[in-house]
Image: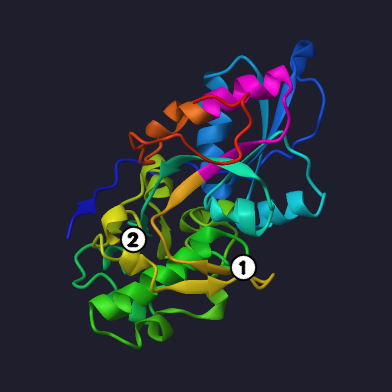
Amino acid sequence: MARQTRRAVLAALGSGIAATAGCGAFGQERVDVLVAGSLQKAASETLQTQTDVEIAVEARGSVQAARLVADGKRDPAIVALADPTLFNRVMDTAWHAVIASNEMVLAYNPETSAGTRITDAEPWYVPLRRDSVSLGRTDPALDPLGYRTLFVLALAADYYDEPGLPDAILSPDQTYPETQLLAQFETGAVDAAFVYRSMAVERDYPFREFPPEIHLGDPAYAEQYQTTSYELPNGSAITGSPIEYGAIRRNTQEATRTAFEAVLSGDWLASHGFTLRQAYPRLVGDVPNTVTR
């Protein structure tokens, strides 16, 4: 199974900037952007360089982000989530754009002896069944990375004919906020974590790849992914599917339209390990005529 080697451990990503409406530095108009935790680095760094508009980024788990908007606790001009189905199931929007894809991997800490055992383990999950390897993941009630971790393990149980695999690996004390998950490597709190490929790539952490039958990144296995599901706290059921990211523009102000054009381009994601398909951006639903590809 393919592995990625570590080049340099980067500093952990800090918390998001709380977005507020208004003008930015020197009277420059500012656009408030609420993004999935896995988009934080790309939005804060690369997206900002691709538009003249000042962008104020706040990062949350996508389920939490969608709830904040739906409940009126946030009013961002642009929302970008790690699961487009949340626009319908939580935010109840009429349309959205699909902008990128990703896949699940197992990142590990090369600075700990437990982490290095994952390097050559066959299969990859063997060290995770031992108490000596500390595992990190995110809360499935707060973000798609959390419930996609559950999907991966459910699919792996079938793929490897290990029906008890999820129960052997998971425990309640493993969850961390998405924006802080890989920061636990820096403190030595975890030896391994279920993350998106993009998260490992942009922080230069080594990772184990999963077979396409379980990594949720190959549309050819969409039917197989659909055998898994998770019920959100609001009662909505999320069914496994190929990982996609979506975005929506919530007003028609010129600055927002300019920033959203940069979001739709996808160029800001390419260097961060995301998958950009020829079909993106894919516009879904009752799309306003002011939104163009």
Find the distance from the CA under tag 2 to the CA under tag 1: 23 Å
Which residues lie in the magenta part? 246-263
The answer to whether 7 appears left or right of 177 in the picture is left
User: As drawn, which residue projects farthest toward the bottom?
Assistant: 164
* Visible residue check, residue 44: yes
Q: How is the image coloured?
A: rainbow
**Which residue type does callout 1 highlight?**
Ala
Q: Nearer the viewer, residue 149 or 109?
A: 149
Where residue 21 sits, quadrant-wise, is top right
- Does the magenta-highlighted stretch encompass residue 258? yes
Q: Nearer the viewer, mark 2 or mark 1?
A: 2
Where residue 112 sits, quadrant-wise, is bottom left
Where residue 154 sits, quadrant-wise, is bottom left
x then y, percent, for residue 15: 64, 45
x then y, percent, for residue 214: 30, 66
Residue at x-position 71% and y-position 27%: 31
Element on which disc 2 rests: helix
Q: Height in image: 31 above or below 63? A: above
Q: Height in image: 106 above or below 198? A: below
**Which residue type does callout 2 highlight?**
Ala
Mark 2 surroundings: few (<14), some (14-19) or many (≥20) residues within 10 A = some
The answer to whether 258 appears left or right of 186 in the picture is right
User: As drawn, which residue projects farthest toward the top?
Assistant: 26
x then y, percent, for residue 161: 24, 84
x then y, percent, for residue 44: 58, 32
Residue, disc 1:
141
Residue, disc 2:
222
* Visible residue check, residue 218: no
Residue at x-position 70% and y-position 38%: 17
The answer to whether 122 appears left or right of 142 in the picture is left
Q: Indicate which disc, 2 or 1, sits on the residue closer to the N terminus.
A: 1
Q: Which mark is residue 196?
A: none
